[in-house]
Image: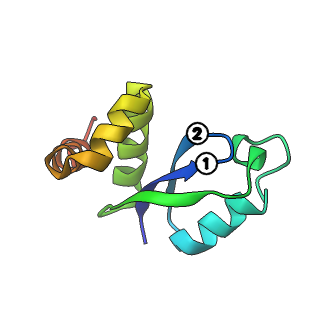
Amino acid sequence: MNCTYIIYSSFIDKYYIGATQESVTDRLEKHNKANYGNKSFTALAKDWEFVLIFICHDFKHAINLERKIKSMKSRVYINNLLKYNDLCFKILEETSKSGT
């Protein structure tokens, strides 16, 4: 499944945005077990949980969406995505077009 996801750790009070082609539950387990190395950002905590998952039509779309959210560099933007469904639909549509 091609997805972009946002996970949150209450331990470090941070969000992480990622994209995957694998099972999102497997991906979350890997983040919580520091499978991406002890120096990776997600290795700082072991309590990551999903706050938002976007299902994308292909992996390129998932990467475009991940980059768009990361480019906003804003916790407020992520909180708005969590609060306003219309914003989620808008960004999902915008990033499905090529070149975004």
Residue ranking furthest to the right: 38
Residue at 19 percent across and 43 percent down: it is 87
**Residue 94: quadrant of the picture:** top left
Residue at 28 percent across and 39 percent down: it is 80
Residue count near mark 1 (Cα–Cα under 10 Å), binned few <14, some 14–19, many ≥20 = few
Which SS class for mark 2? strand
Residue 60: percent from left, percent from top: 39, 52
**Left or right of residue 67: residue 20:** right
Q: Is residue 99 above or below residue 26?
A: above
Q: Is residue 96 above or below residue 80?
A: below
Residue at 55 percent across and 50 percent down: it is 8
**Residue 73: quadrant of the picture:** top left
Scheme of colours in the image: rainbow
**Left or right of residue 93: residue 20:** right
Residue count near mark 2 (Cα–Cα under 10 Å), binned few <14, some 14–19, many ≥20 = some
Question: What residue does disc 2 label?
Answer: 14
Q: Which amino acid does the dot numbered 1 rest on? A: Ser
Residue 24 disc label: none
Q: Quadrant of the C terminus?
A: top left
Number of callouts in the render? 2
Residue 59: percent from left, percent from top: 41, 58
Which SS class for mark 1? loop
Q: Are marks 2 and 1 in contact (CB under 8 Å)?
A: no
Of the residues tagged 2 and 1, which is closer to the observer?
A: 1
Q: Which amino acid does the dot numbered 2 rest on? A: Lys
Q: Quadrant of the N terminus?
A: bottom left
In the foreground, 36 or 41: 41
Residue 96: percent from left, percent from top: 23, 49
Residue 10 disc label: 1
**Left or right of residue 3: residue 22:** right
Q: What is the spatial separation of the Cα atoms under label 2 and label 1, in whole angstroms?
A: 7 Å
Residue 83: percent from left, percent from top: 26, 47
